[in-house]
């Protein structure tokens, strides 16, 4: 009820009242309000504290450029720090609190910083806090860190969801002010696919904040009419509440749509925000202009704001920021604020115009050639001091001051490709660069065309031109008559004075700081910015950067463009991390790949482990087993004693066909394949071109021209890519065709002395040793279902891998276990797989780490020198074949009770634990129930010659060491009798 | 002795395909189609053989329905052939005699989980899922694309009927993504 | 002018009128004994140590733009010496030790802050690899600890421990790791070098090398010819461009790395953290911004800007690791040109042209290397011999098969 | 970025995996040299040395999430403008590669 500063008019819905709270106190506003407009309507000017000096602050602007009115929105897990009150759309029940103050906004103890400000000049911390040395981290920095930041995170998981999506259009229009709407209308009527984004919840841009007419209608009504027509066109997509964030390459723009931020909480299933990637063939920047202040002493008090904002609060929101106001300007647009406010019945005490000559405003005290030299008021403006043209100084009581130093085209996005903005003297501002993002043009105020007439004309014209590029004919619509006032500005950046005049309000950078930077040789724009922190606050210097540049220009005696330009980087305004992350969080961070036996394994109570994207059964606990070791030992022993079954579907499977497939395999494998007979499998070693091992696996020749390659689980994708590279880029005429079949087949390893007996119950063909010997392969059937059988072994046991179409994978594991019941068959997981392969001395991921050669792995002889396989030549470089290099070895603790730790390093007995004595490391460690102790594989310098030696395996992280014996890596059946059984 | 015969399950792990409706769209798990890749071998021309057998070989980016089989383009000289599962369970056996040694044929039926999305406003759903301009490409288009980190094929059979083929092992992740997007849009 | 607490107080009370330029802007002389090409962190450190530690004189540093404007001016400020391989670890440990005494050494507060770095692991294989690495670090005299899940949770309770696709199992920690105020490093070295007589010449672009009889005699620049007995090039992402002027091709590519900072937030993350299941690393600056990054964009680029896929990949990693940051806002992104070498490790070596020396290939780990890189390069320039901690950083290591490939990715720069 | 695929039209670069300089097509035949040293020299230059130009760069991209074509993309590394896109297989043949 007490919206004491609410006046008539504006685009708010007075038929509805919304309640909200700020710092615990209740207020009321209306739909159409922002938090800032509603607080101002309630007479609240003080909304925040500055970063360094904790100065009391109110809104400077009425838009996203806001540096001061920064609050914490919402509560609990939805607490949202650093939210600009000037763009936060009011909703019923909104809560907000002020930030960076203690204990309260009106009494902030850290305000003492303001009194100590002489010590906190730009760069002060670089010159001090260095003595004594350790005090920086123990004393000074903790204090500084505690004072850091503005708002706080909740430290709770963000409860809201975010979506991401892709849009495609012929023309993207960024900003729905007069230029953007005229452009959209032109392109929309021509039938082009048009997307219009606008950060505001109400399209129209400045038309909503101004009083001038467009034709017979008010600006706001004209905008509403155009928006209605655009909304009716199926080829036009209007996206209010959508900020275009950045220009990427080739016409791609990122944007964030605030779907639910104007609601208390998002509706069920709906996102809070959506990150859009907009693929445009052409784009048009019609983002308007941002007003800039003139710096003067104490120009940061609540109540002092940009003149255009003061006007917007009155015209759009029906709010008189103060009952008695003044305007300080160097250009005609500032005068418009005075006339508009006066027309609203607000007491305009004076217009302080830095210019001389020209017509005087009628009915208003218009002081030409005057300056505002300071302000007064503890928590908000109560008076300004004026120096008249004649030098006389006057103190004028006012509660609001509108300041206009001119307007900067909002070219932010046009410089995202590092194009340099171009200075235009006529408007005393930078306009978009000539070498901006390809396909992007600018129109309206964003292009430096400030009148409404020019905005409409240039917007429509730019749309015609853009569509013409695309071969679409568009015609200019009938545009209404509109004001076409010229820009009349006499640049004025700051008012000379002794006190502090703020350039960057949030970061508390003053004219004095810029001067000090200059004095210390930090004169380039980049140095200025970094030394003073100018433009690095949450507003990214949207109102202050040019001002700082101008001050530096004056100090160095150069022009502004000579001094430098500020270019911008994405995002245009800060964007929630949640939106950039989308749905990829929690369990949905990455997709989950399930093996064909997953459902069954889950029923068995298997413990699963992430292997890349896959979930694999790690072990299968049985009743009574209390540690994983018990389960794994049982699985290993049962497999070696009888038979075990493991899902090995995750290994990559690549179907290779064609008449040159053998020659192709000879190219990609270090060993020879073309000589392999049909129905046979061979182990292959694949090298990178630099001679390091890339991958290993078995490849089976299923037919004359048909091969199936297996890769490691981890390398399935890179190996496929590599094969295509060799096929297309190196051997373009080879008759070879490739396709992945990893997902098509469910594949199980059946290992152990009873493996054959088990399989014979299922397989319809003769698989006796004679019919299906070691390293045989072939197409078979399982109870009538087409299948593939490979007699290969990773465990060292008599073993097969059997593959059925994936849809039968679930049935197959059940059938295998059922058939294996009489043999006490076990299912085993990745742990047991690992134990058995270490026992057998097979290398895997920990040994195939991209740093090791075939020679390191003891497989040097596999590299054929008779053919030009990938990696052959460079694998022979001196550093890779040096005597005494790393060789794979087996490792056993001398005392079987001692556990080994992977990653421990080898040292000689008695050798000091220093790098010079480092002999290598343990790559993989398992407990071998077969050996009865921990065993390991390791890479050891001169390892082959050290077999039988005793060394120390040292883990300095745990401060443990174990005496170990170096042995052959083949702990089980070194002669390979079993697998041929 | 226990019955050891093998019974298939669907990509989502059930006996029967799943079907759900959200707003104007229906998402159905589809298991009635056999798939095989067909790659023309170097120096061969399989156009005539394909034509004779009524197997379409559409150009890049396209899908085409033939009398019995349909096909979409995978990569240069390579297509995915679709055939009714009931009659073509062993699809390779059907195709081999048609092409002989002129083509490499690989069964792909179980490599993919297929979800058909039917109903109105499909472009609005797919714009949250993938960077494939459904509205521009229209019916008869097919493309590989990414959905929530999964490499998938999108086949636009009609404006109101789009198939998504994703890696079978990730069927649940893909289905979840489709369902979540539908709830978000509708 | 020496900076001191007393001086700061005196200046504060007298309107800061006494502060002079932090470094002199020099105009080029006809010739020097040494010219350092590149006014980034490494070049400035080289000039500084050449003058201070190796007592050399007649030194100029030329920079095409403004000093400190390269990668030292845009990075994620992390220092650490948690390397695995013998070729690297002694060097990075030497660097960390120099960081520890840097501010007193050059009388400039660069805010070296050793709040610890943790590398999270999520699989047994990662744990094994970190165990190997931690041991290697300790063997080289660095500090390392292996933390279990509970220890990580005690430090950072807000990480995603309960709902993760790839659960956190533990971390490798280096307590001496931390962050440094990056710009201050450039300015501190510049000031220290300038005070010791080094001519810092800004806005001076090298356009060629003048050679006589197989040795360099000076550089052609946008400000004319400058003679030199020895020239050291340290230009990071521009290495290939500059060395092409000496007809050299390098084993490296230039790639863009993006980095990001959030709006200022009250302190929440004390140290530095890297995610082991996604591309994301983060620390919080003394101003309160979360400073984070991920992978390079992955294609050759000199554009100093990146594209959305990596931005999103990093955010996805961040959100999956700490879902509390959903409502924190990304404030600013930037892109730097990385000199990605063929094995992910740098080169500090002589070239085949006498008098011409090269320092580059830092990939995206150059910032932490700044002091040691400068020291070792100065050592090489002054003595003709590599510093003992940098003997492996040779051009010919690729020909000889002595790669220093920490990540095991081979000759593909964008994978390092 | 958007790569204008010769067969599929404009596709987002995100669908592709980057390899590097297209000179990788010009792989020397390791058995064609008079000595192992000469072969290593040639293979070293081929694998490790890069022009790394600031400007036009011919480079290999793999359409991993697309049609699995390797492409040679001519792109300006300063502006990212793409000037030409070819199938790598065609380029390889033009450069004399066969089997």
Image (cartoon, coloured by chain):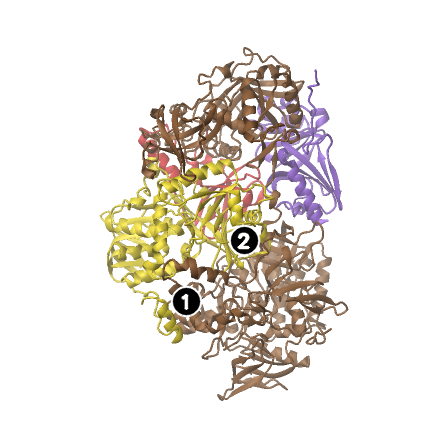
Chain colours: A brown, B purple, C yellow, D red
Q: Residue at x 66, y 31 (%)?
A: B56
- Give the residue at mark 2: A248
Check the residue under mark 2 and report the chain it is in. A
Answer few, some or many: residues within 10 Å of disc 1's Cα (few below 14, many 20 plus, some between 14 and 19): some
Q: Residue at x 58, y 15 (%)?
A: A756
In this view, A490 is above or below D23? below
Coordinates of residue A768 in the picture (x, y in percent): 57, 12
The part of the image, by quadrant, that contains residue A104 is: bottom right
- Label 2 and label 1: CA atoms lie apart by 38 Å
Q: Nearer the viewer, residue C132 or A950?
A: A950
Q: Nearer the viewer, residue D84 or A686?
A: A686
Residue C77 can be seen, yes or no: yes
Q: Mark 1 falls on what kind of element? A: helix
Task: Report whether A903 appears left or right of C25.
Answer: right
In this view, A487 is above or below C99? below
In the image, which is nearer the foreground, mark 2 or mark 1?
Answer: 1
Q: Nearer the viewer, residue A113 or A872?
A: A113
Coordinates of residue A940 in the picture (x, y in percent): 37, 30
Answer few, some or many: residues within 10 Å of disc 2's Cα (few below 14, many 20 plus, some between 14 and 19): many
Which is nearer the N-term, disc 2 or disc 1? 1
Please give the label number shown on residue A124.
1
Task: Report whether A87 appears left or right of A975.
Answer: right
In this view, A605 is above or below A207? above
Check the residue under mark 1 and report the chain it is in. A
Task: Report whether C218 appears left or right of A777.
Answer: left
| Quadrant in which the N terminus of chain A is drawn | bottom right
Q: Mark 2 falls on what kind of element? A: loop
Please give the label number shown on residue A83.
none
In this view, C6 is above or below A247? below
């Amino acid at each position: 009820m007490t919206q004491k500063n609410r006046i008539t008019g504006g685009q708010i819905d007075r038929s509805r009242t919304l309640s909200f709270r700020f710092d615990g106190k209740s207020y009321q506003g209306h739909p159409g309000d922002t938090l800032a407009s509603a607080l101002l309507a309630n007479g609240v000017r003080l909304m925040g504290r500055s970063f360094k000096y904790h100065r009391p602050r109110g809104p400077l602007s009425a838009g996203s450029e806001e540096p001061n009115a920064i609050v914490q929105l919402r509560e609990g897990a939805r607490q949202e720090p650093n939210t600009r009150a000037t763009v936060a759309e009011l909703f019923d029940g909104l809560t907000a609190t002020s930030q960076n103050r203690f204990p309260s906004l009106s009494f902030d103890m850290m305000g003492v910083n303001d009194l100590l400000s002489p010590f906190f000049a730009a760069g002060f911390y670089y010159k001090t806090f260095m003595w004594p040395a350790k005090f920086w981290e123990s004393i000074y920095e903790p204090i500084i860190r505690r004072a850091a930041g503005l708002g706080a995170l909740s430290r709770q998981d963000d409860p809201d969801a975010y979506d991401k999506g892709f849009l495609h259009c012929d023309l993207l229009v960024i900003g729905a002010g007069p230029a953007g709407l005229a452009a959209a209308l032109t392109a929309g009527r021509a039938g082009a696919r048009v997307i219009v984004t606008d950060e505001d919840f109400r399209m129209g841009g400045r038309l909503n904040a101004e009083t001038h007419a467009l034709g017979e209608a008010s600006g706001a009504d004209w905008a509403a009419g155009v928006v209605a027509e655009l909304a009716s066109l199926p080829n036009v997509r209007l996206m209010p509440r959508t900020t275009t964030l950045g220009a990427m390459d080739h016409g791609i723009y990122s944007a964030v749509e605030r779907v639910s931020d104007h609601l208390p909480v998002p509706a069920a299933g709906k996102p809070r925000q959506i990150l859009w990637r907009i693929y445009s063939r052409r784009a048009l920047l019609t983002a308007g202009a941002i007003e800039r202040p003139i710096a003067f002493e104490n120009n940061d008090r609540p109540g002092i704001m940009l003149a255009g904002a003061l006007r917007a609060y009155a015209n759009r929101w029906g709010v008189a920021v103060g009952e008695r106001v003044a305007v300080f300007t160097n250009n005609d647009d500032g005068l418009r604020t005075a006339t508009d406010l006066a027309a609203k019945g607000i007491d305009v005490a004076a217009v302080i115009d830095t210019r001389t000559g020209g017509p005087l405003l009628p009915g208003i005290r218009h002081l030409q050639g005057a300056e505002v030299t300071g302000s007064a008021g503890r928590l908000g403006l109560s008076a300004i001091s004026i120096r008249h043209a004649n030098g006389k100084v006057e103190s004028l009581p006012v509660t609001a001051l509108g300041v206009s130093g001119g307007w900067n085209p909002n070219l932010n996005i046009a410089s995202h490709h590092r194009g340099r903005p171009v200075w235009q003297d006529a408007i005393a501002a930078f306009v978009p660069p000539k070498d901006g993002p390809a396909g992007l043009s600018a129109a309206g105020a964003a292009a430096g065309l400030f009148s409404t007439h020019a905005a409409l004309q240039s917007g429509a014209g730019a749309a015609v031109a853009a569509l013409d590029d695309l071969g679409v004919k568009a015609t200019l619509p009938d545009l209404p008559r509109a004001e076409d006032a010229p820009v009349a500005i006499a640049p004025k950046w700051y008012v000379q004075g002794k006190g502090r005049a703020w350039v960057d309000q949030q970061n508390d950078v003053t004219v004095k700081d810029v001067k000090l930077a200059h004095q210390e040789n930090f004169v380039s724009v980049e140095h200025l910015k970094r030394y003073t922190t100018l433009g690095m606050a949450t507003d990214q210097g949207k109102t202050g950067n040019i001002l700082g540049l101008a001050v530096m220009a004056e100090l160095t005696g150069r022009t502004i463009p000579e001094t430098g330009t500020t270019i911008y980087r994405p995002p245009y305004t800060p964007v929630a991390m949640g939106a950039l992350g989308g749905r990829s969080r929690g369990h949905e961070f990455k997709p989950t790949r399930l093996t064909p036996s997953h459902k069954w394994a889950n029923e068995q109570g298997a413990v699963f482990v992430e292997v890349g994207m896959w979930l694999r059964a790690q072990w299968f606990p049985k009743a009574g087993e209390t540690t994983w070791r018990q389960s794994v030992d049982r699985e290993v022993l049962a497999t070696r004693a009888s038979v075990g079954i493991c899902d090995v579907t995750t290994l990559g499977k690549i179907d290779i066909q064609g008449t040159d497939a053998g020659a192709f395999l000879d190219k990609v494998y270090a060993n020879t394949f073309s000589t392999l007979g049909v129905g046979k499998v061979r182990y292959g070693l694949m090298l990178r071109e630099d001679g390091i091992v890339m991958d290993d696996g078995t490849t089976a020749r299923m037919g004359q021209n048909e091969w199936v390659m297996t890769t490691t689980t981890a390398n399935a994708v890179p190996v496929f890519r590599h094969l295509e590279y060799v096929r297309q880029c190196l051997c373009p005429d080879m008759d070879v065709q490739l396709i992945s079949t990893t997902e098509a087949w469910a594949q199980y390893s059946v290992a152990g002395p009873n493996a054959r007996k088990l399989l014979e119950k299922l397989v319809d063909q003769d698989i006796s040793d004679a019919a299906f010997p070691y390293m045989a392969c072939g197409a078979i059937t399982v109870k009538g279902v087409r299948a593939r059988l490979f007699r290969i072994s990773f465990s060292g046991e008599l073993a097969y891998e059997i593959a059925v179409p994936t849809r039968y994978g679930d049935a197959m594991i059940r059938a295998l276990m059922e058939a294996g019941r009489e043999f006490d068959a076990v299912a085993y997981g990745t742990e047991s797989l690992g134990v058995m392969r270490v026992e057998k001395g097979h290398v895997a991921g920990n040994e195939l780490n991209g740093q090791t050669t075939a020679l390191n792995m003891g497989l040097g002889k596999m590299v054929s020198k008779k053919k030009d396989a990938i990696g052959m030549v460079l694998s022979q470089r001196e550093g890779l074949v040096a005597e005494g290099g790393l060789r794979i070895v087996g490792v056993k603790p001398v005392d079987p009770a001692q556990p080994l730790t992977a990653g421990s390093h080898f040292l000689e007995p008695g050798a000091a634990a220093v790098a010079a004595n480092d002999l290598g490391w343990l790559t993989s460690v398992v407990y071998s129930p077969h050996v009865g102790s921990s065993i390991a594989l390791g890479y050891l310098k001169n390892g082959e010659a050290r077999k039988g030696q005793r060394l120390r395996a040292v883990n300095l992280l745990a401060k443990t060491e174990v005496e170990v014996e170096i042995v052959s890596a083949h702990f089980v059946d070194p002669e390979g009798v079993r697998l041929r059984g | 002795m226990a019955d050891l015969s093998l019974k298939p399950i669907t990509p989502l792990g059930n006996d029967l395909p799943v079907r759900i409706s959200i707003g104007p769209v229906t998402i159905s798990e589809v298991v009635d189609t056999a798939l095989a890749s067909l790659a023309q071998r170097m120096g061969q021309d399989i156009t005539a053989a394909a034509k004779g057998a009524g197997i379409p070989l559409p150009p890049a980016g396209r899908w085409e329905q033939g009398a019995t089989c349909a096909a979409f383009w995978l990569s240069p000289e390579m297509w995915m052939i679709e055939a009714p599962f009931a009659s073509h369970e062993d699809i390779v056996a059907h195709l081999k005699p048609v092409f002989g040694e002129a083509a490499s044929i690989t069964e792909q039926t179980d490599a993919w989980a297929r979800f058909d999305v039917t109903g109105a406003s499909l472009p609005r759903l797919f714009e949250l899922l993938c960077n494939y301009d459904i509205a521009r490409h229209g019916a008869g288009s097919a493309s590989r694309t990414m959905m929530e980190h999964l490499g998938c094929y999108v086949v636009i059979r009609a404006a109101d009927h789009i198939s998504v083929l994703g890696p079978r092992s990730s069927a649940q992740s893909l289905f979840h993504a489709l369902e979540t997007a539908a709830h978000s849009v509708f | 002018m020496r900076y001191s607490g007393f001086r700061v107080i005196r200046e504060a009370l007298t309107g800061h009128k006494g502060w002079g330029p932090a470094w002199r802007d020099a105009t080029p002389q006809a010739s020097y004994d040494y010219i350092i090409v590149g006014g980034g962190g490494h070049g400035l450190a080289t000039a500084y140590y050449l003058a201070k530690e190796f007592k050399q004189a007649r030194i100029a540093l030329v920079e095409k733009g403004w000093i400190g404007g390269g990668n030292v001016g845009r990075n994620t400020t992390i220092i650490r010496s948690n390397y695995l391989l013998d070729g690297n670890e002694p060097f990075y440990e030497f660097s960390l030790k120099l960081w520890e005494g840097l501010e007193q050494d050059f009388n400039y507060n660069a805010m070296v802050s050793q709040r610890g770095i943790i590398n999270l692991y999520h699989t047994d294989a990662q744990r094994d690899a970190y165990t190997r690495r931690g041991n290697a670090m300790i063997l080289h005299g660095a500090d390392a600890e292996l933390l279990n899940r509970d220890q990580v949770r005690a430090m950072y309770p807000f990480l995603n421990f309960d709902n993760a696709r790839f659960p956190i199992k533990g971390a490798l920690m280096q307590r001496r790791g931390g962050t440094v105020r990056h710009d201050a490093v450039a300015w501190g070295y510049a000031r220290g070098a300038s005070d010791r007589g080094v001519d810092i010449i800004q806005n001076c672009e090298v356009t060629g090398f003048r050679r006589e009889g197989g040795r360099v005699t000076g550089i052609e620049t946008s400000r004319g010819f400058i003679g030199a007995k020895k020239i050291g090039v340290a230009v990071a992402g521009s290495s290939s461009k500059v060395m092409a002027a000496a007809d050299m091709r390098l084993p490296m590519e230039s790639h863009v790395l993006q980095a990001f900072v959030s709006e200022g937030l009250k302190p929440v993350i004390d140290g530095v953290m890297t995610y082991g299941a996604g591309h994301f690393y983060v620390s919080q600056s003394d101003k309160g911004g979360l400073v984070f990054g991920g992978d390079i964009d992955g294609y050759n680029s000199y554009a100093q800007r990146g594209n959305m896929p990596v931005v999103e990949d990093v955010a996805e990693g961040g959100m999956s690791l700490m879902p509390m940051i959903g409502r924190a806002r990304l404030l600013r992104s930037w892109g730097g040109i990385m000199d990605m070498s063929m094995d992910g490790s740098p080169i500090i070596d002589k070239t085949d042209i006498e008098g011409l020396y090269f320092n580059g290939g830092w990939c995206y780990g150059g910032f932490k290397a700044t002091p040691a890189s400068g020291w070792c390069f100065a050592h090489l320039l002054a003595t003709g011999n590599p510093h003992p901690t940098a003997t492996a950083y040779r051009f010919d290591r690729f020909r000889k098969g002595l790669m220093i490939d920490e990540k095991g990715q081979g000759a593909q720069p964008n994978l390092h | 970025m958007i790569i204008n695929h010769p067969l599929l039209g404009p596709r987002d670069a995100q669908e592709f995996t980057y390899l590097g300089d297209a000179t990788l097509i010009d792989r020397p035949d390791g058995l064609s040299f008079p000595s192992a040293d000469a072969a290593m020299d040639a293979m070293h230059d081929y694998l490790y040395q890069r022009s790394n130009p600031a400007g036009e760069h011919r480079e290999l991209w793999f359409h991993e999430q697309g049609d699995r074509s390797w492409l040679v993309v001519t792109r300006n590394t300063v502006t990212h403008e793409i000037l030409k896109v070819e199938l790598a297989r065609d380029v390889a043949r033009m450069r004399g590669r066969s089997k």
